[in-house]
Image (cartoon, grey):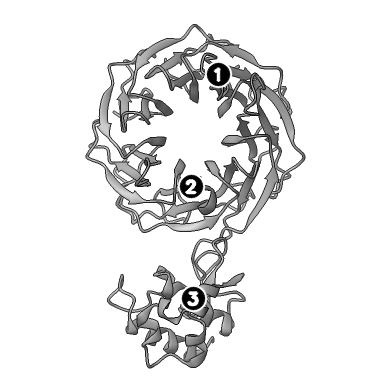
C-alpha cells in the first residue's frame, strides 16, 4: 500500500476527526496514524476496488477515448481522438496503442483525422469483420468559421488504418456514436452539432460509405450522443446532452432511421457527456449525464434519470462528482451485477476519476477518487488485462497521455481487520488501512451496527478482530 503523510494534518491536530482523537480505546499507534491517508490509486483495501495506474504518451490535446479489439487478437486496444494544436489549420488526429495482451500497450500509431478531433467511436462500418473508426472533428478553436466534419478511417485488418474519408455534418460536430439506426444490419452514425442545436444522422450505404446527413433538432449546444433502445420497441433511439440548455433530448426512432421530435428533460448546469444503461435493474435503459457547472459556483455533479419503462423518464437525481466532470461511463466495476458510474474530472489542480458504486437500485454511494493524469477529458471501460473485470482508460488533455487503471480488486483477508496486503497477516498496514478508511468514511471501516454510521462500535469491532488474529 502506498501511503502519504498529510503534513498539514500532522502540523494541525485540530484538523483531525474528533471521533478518532477522542476515542479512549485507540492504541497510541492508531492515534498516531490519524493523518495517514491512502494514495487515490490504492483503493479501499479488503474487497475494495484497487486501480493501480500506468500512463502512456498520446497525441496533442487528447479529448476522446474508445476501446476495442483493433488488431483481432482478442484483447482491447486504445484509440484516442486528439484535438491537435490550437494553431490555425493544424489538423487533429487519432492515436492508437495496441494491447500486448496483458494490459500494457505497444508504441503509438498516429492517423490524421481532421481539424479539432473530439470524439472517436469504433465499429465495423464496412462489414469486413474488423473495427473501423468514426471521428467527429469540431474545427479549430481559433476560427469558428471552419465547421469541421466527420471522418471514417477503415481498418486494414491488422490494426492499422487507411486515410480518412470525410463527410459533412452540421456546424462544429463534437460527438459521434455508431449503431444500426435503420435496421438494415449495418452501422449508421449520429453526430451532435454544437453550434446548430441539432444532430446529424448519416445512414450507411452498406459498404461503409454514408448517405447525406439528415438533421434533427436537439437542445442548445448539444455535446454528446448515445444510442440505445429506450422505449423497448426494437430500434435504437437517441439521448443527447445539451450544454447550452442544461437538459437532455430524447429522440425516438420511427423504425426506419428517421426520428420523432425531441422530448426534453432537465439535467444539471452545462451537461457534458451522456451514457445509457440499466441502472436500477428493471430491464429498461436509464440515463446518466455529467454536468460541468458554471462560474462562479461550479456545481459539478452527475444527473441520473430513471426510465419509467416506456422511454419517458423520472426527474433527475443528482450526485456529487469531482471538479469539472467531463465524461461518464457505466459498467459493473465491483462485480455485484449492477452498473456503476465512472466520471473523468478535468479541473487541472484536482484531476482525478470518480467512481460511484451502485447501491443496487439505481441510487449511488458517495464517490471514491482515483488518480489520473492532468485534465482528464474522457473515460472508457473494458477488460484490458483479460482478468474478467473492468478496467479504465482515461484521456488527459494537459498531460497529453492516457491513464490505464487496471482493476485489481483482491479478495478479502482472513477476517474483517485484514484490510491490507499481504492478506493473511495482521500488522501495522492493517491498522493504518483501517484508520484511513475510518477517517474517509470508507465502507471498509464500517464493521459494526448501525451500518452507515462510523462510530466507537466500528473501532471496537476492528480491535476485537485484530486481536483474534488469523487462523
Q: Residues within 10 Å of mark 2 (few under 14, many from 20)?
A: many
Classify residue 164 as left or right of residue 50.
right
Asked which quadrant contains residue 72, the reply is: top right
Considering only vertical position in the picture, is 409 above or below 319?
A: below
Cα gap from disc 1 to disc 2, whole angstroms: 27 Å
Considering only vertical position in the picture, is 23 above or below 306?
A: below
- Residue drawn 41% across the image and 57% down it: 367
Judged by depth in the image, the label closer to the viewer, 2 or 3, is: 3
Q: Mark 2 points at which residue?
A: 345
User: In the image, residue 18 lies at what x, y percent?
Assistant: 36, 81
Judged by depth in the image, the label closer to the viewer, 1 or 2, is: 1
Q: Mark 1 points at which residue?
A: 143
Cα gap from disc 1 to disc 3, whole angstroms: 48 Å
Q: Viewer-proximal residue, 192 or 280?
A: 192
Residue 359 disc label:
none
Q: Mark 3 points at which residue?
A: 9
Compare marks 2 and 3 and give the one earlier in the sequence: 3
Under circle 3, the secondary element is: helix
- Residue drawn 71% across the image and 46% down it: 101
Residue 202 visible in the shown view:
yes
Compare marks 1 and 2 and give the one earlier in the sequence: 1
Amino acid at each position: 500500500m502506498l501511503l502519504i503523510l498529510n503534513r498539514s494534518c500532522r502540523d494541525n491536530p485540530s484538523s483531525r476527526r474528533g471521533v478518532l482523537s477522542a476515542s479512549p480505546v485507540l492504541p497510541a499507534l492508531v492515534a498516531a496514524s490519524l493523518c495517514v491517508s491512502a494514495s487515490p490509486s490504492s483503493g479501499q483495501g479488503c474487497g475494495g476496488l484497487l486501480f493501480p495506474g500506468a500512463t502512456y504518451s498520446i497525441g496533442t490535446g487528447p479529448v476522446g477515448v474508445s476501446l476495442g479489439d483493433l488488431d483481432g487478437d482478442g484483447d482491447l486496444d486504445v484509440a484516442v481522438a486528439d484535438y491537435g494544436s490550437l494553431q490555425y489549420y493544424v489538423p487533429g488526429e487519432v492515436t492508437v496503442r495496441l494491447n500486448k495482451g496483458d494490459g500494457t500497450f505497444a508504441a503509438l500509431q498516429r492517423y490524421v483525422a481532421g481539424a479539432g478531433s473530439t470524439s472517436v467511436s469504433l465499429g465495423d462500418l464496412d462489414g469486413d469483420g474488423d473495427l473501423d473508426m468514426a471521428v467527429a472533428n469540431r474545427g479549430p478553436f481559433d476560427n469558428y468559421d471552419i465547421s469541421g466534419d466527420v471522418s471514417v478511417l477503415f481498418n486494414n485488418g491488422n490494426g492499422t488504418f487507411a486515410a480518412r474519408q470525410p463527410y459533412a455534418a452540421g456546424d462544429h460536430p463534437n460527438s459521434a456514436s455508431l449503431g444500426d439506426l435503420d435496421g438494415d444490419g449495418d452501422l449508421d452514425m449520429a453526430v451532435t452539432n454544437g453550434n446548430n442545436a441539432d444532430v446529424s444522422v448519416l445512414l450507411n450505404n452498406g459498404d461503409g460509405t454514408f448517405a447525406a446527413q439528415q438533421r434533427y433538432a436537439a437542445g442548445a449546444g448539444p455535446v454528446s450522443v448515445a444510442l440505445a433502445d429506450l422505449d423497448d420497441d426494437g430500434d435504437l433511439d437517441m439521448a443527447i446532452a445539451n450544454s447550452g440548455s442544461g437538459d437532455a433530448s430524447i429522440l425516438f426512432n420511427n423504425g426506419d432511421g428517421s426520428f420523432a421530435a425531441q422530448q426534453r428533460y432537465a439535467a444539471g448546469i452545462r451537461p457534458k457527456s451522456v451514457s445509457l444503461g440499466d441502472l436500477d435493474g428493471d430491464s429498461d435503459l436509464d440515463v446518466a449525464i455529467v454536468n460541468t457547472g458554471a462560474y462562479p459556483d461550479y456545481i459539478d455533479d452527475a444527473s441520473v434519470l430513471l426510465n419509467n419503462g416506456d422511454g419517458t423518464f423520472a426527474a433527475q437525481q443528482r450526485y456529487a462528482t469531482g471538479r469539472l466532470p467531463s465524461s461518464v461511463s457505466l459498467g459493473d466495476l465491483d462485480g455485484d451485477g449492477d452498473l456503476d458510474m465512472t466520471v473523468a474530472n478535468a479541473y487541472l489542480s484536482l484531476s482525478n476519476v470518480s467512481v460511484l458504486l451502485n447501491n443496487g437500485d439505481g441510487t449511488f454511494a458517495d464517490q471514491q477518487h482515483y488518480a489520473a493524469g492532468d485534465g482528464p477529458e474522457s473515460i472508457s471501460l473494458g477488460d484490458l488485462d483479460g482478468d474478467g473485470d473492468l478496467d479504465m482508460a482515461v484521456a488527459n488533455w494537459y498531460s497529453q497521455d492516457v491513464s490505464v487503471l487496471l482493476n485489481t480488486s483482491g479478495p478479502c483477508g482472513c477476517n474483517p481487520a485484514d484490510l491490507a496486503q499481504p492478506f493473511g497477516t495482521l500488522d501495522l498496514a492493517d491498522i493504518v488501512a483501517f484508520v484511513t478508511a475510518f477517517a474517509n468514511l470508507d465502507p471498509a471501516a464500517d464493521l459494526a451496527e448501525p451500518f452507515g454510521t462510523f462510530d466507537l462500535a466500528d473501532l471496537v469491532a476492528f480491535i476485537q478482530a485484530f486481536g483474534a488474529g488469523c487462523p
